[in-house]
Image (cartoon, rainbow, N blue to C red):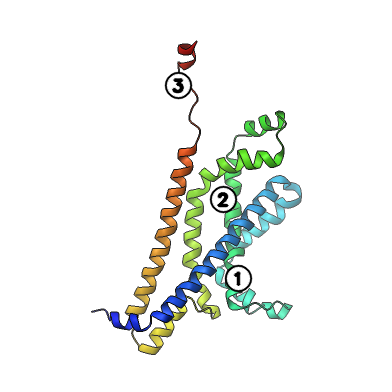
Amino acid sequence: MLDIALLWEARGLILQGLWNTLWICFLGCLLALSLGLVLAALRLANPRLFGYPVACYVEVCRGTPLLILLFLLYYGGPSIGLRLDAEIAGVAGIGLYGAGYFAEIYRGGFKSIAKGQLEAARMLGISPWHTLIRIQIPQMARLIIPPSTNQLIILVKESALISIISVDDLTKNATTIVNQTFQVIEPYLAVALLYWLMIELIARGGYALEKRLANRQPRQAAQPGATHANG
């Protein structure tokens, strides 16, 4: 039988860990989404100047474990004058790590837009900025929601690694409860349930956003044969 009373007594540590996990994941994912968009835009805007550096950054992110990046930021930072709190190092690590993946997701979304639309926008005198805001991003958004949702889920699950750099997140606080009570199952089951709830919210939010954007997709102006019928 599960000892629910133990979890109630340890609710302070669990809630503290949940709060730390939530705000660190939120800021880290927000940084990853924003920086990834900047990297993708730079790479596409000027491939000669930014193509190789951004490609190198993406490959480093995809080839380096998040834990190593966290170690470099938190333990290696002081050797070069960079002293970060554990929580800030966690946000930066998640953001920098995820940005490489989101840069590729964005790039794929931009590349999927037909070049004819961009050429037509230039011929009509539409500025590059308005082309980006009105044409490229709305179409790209519908395409990148599923892979972006999956990547956010991965980042949230991998955020458990921040416990290794002494962040009082869900995983670390659950381990503290285990060390104090010698009860293993209840604390880790509670943490697993909370992570599952976070992941479920992200997945459902992504699905709802994808459905909403799909419903906004412009419908075909006329069905086949409509022109002749109206004529």
Q: Is residue 63 visible?
A: no
| CB-based contact (under 8 Å), mark 1 and mark 3 | no
Q: Tag 2 or tag 1, which sits nearer the N-term?
A: 1
Q: Which residue is mark 1?
A: 69
Q: CA distance from mark 3 to mark 2?
A: 34 Å
x and y percentages locating residue 157 in the rendered image? 46, 66
Secondary structure, mark 3, is loop
Q: Which residue is mark 3?
A: 223
Q: Is residue 227 visible?
A: yes
Q: Tag 3 or tag 1, which sits nearer the N-term?
A: 1
x and y percentages locating residue 42 in the rendered image? 70, 50
Is residue 27 shown above or below 12? above
Looking at the rendered structure, the kind of residue marked 1 is Leu
Which residue is drawn at the image coordinates 51% and 53% (left, top)? 148
- In the displayed image of the protein, which residue is found farthest to the left? 1
Which residue is drawn at the image coordinates 49% and 27% (left, top)? 220
The quadrant where residue 141 appears: top right
Crowd rating for badge 1 (residues with CA inside 10 Å; few <14, some 14–19, many 20+): many
Which residue is drawn at the image coordinates 41% and 78% (left, top)? 14
In front of the other: label 1 or label 3? 3
Q: From the viewer's perspective, is 101 left or right of 222?
A: right
- Image quadrant containing the N terminus: bottom left
- In the displayed image of the protein, which residue is found farthest to the right? 49
Is residue 106 shown above or below 191? above
Q: Tag 2 or tag 3, which sits nearer the N-term?
A: 2
Crowd rating for badge 2 (residues with CA inside 10 Å; few <14, some 14–19, many 20+): many
Crowd rating for badge 3 (residues with CA inside 10 Å; few <14, some 14–19, many 20+): few
Q: Which residue is mark 2?
A: 105
| CB-based contact (under 8 Å), mark 1 and mark 2 | no
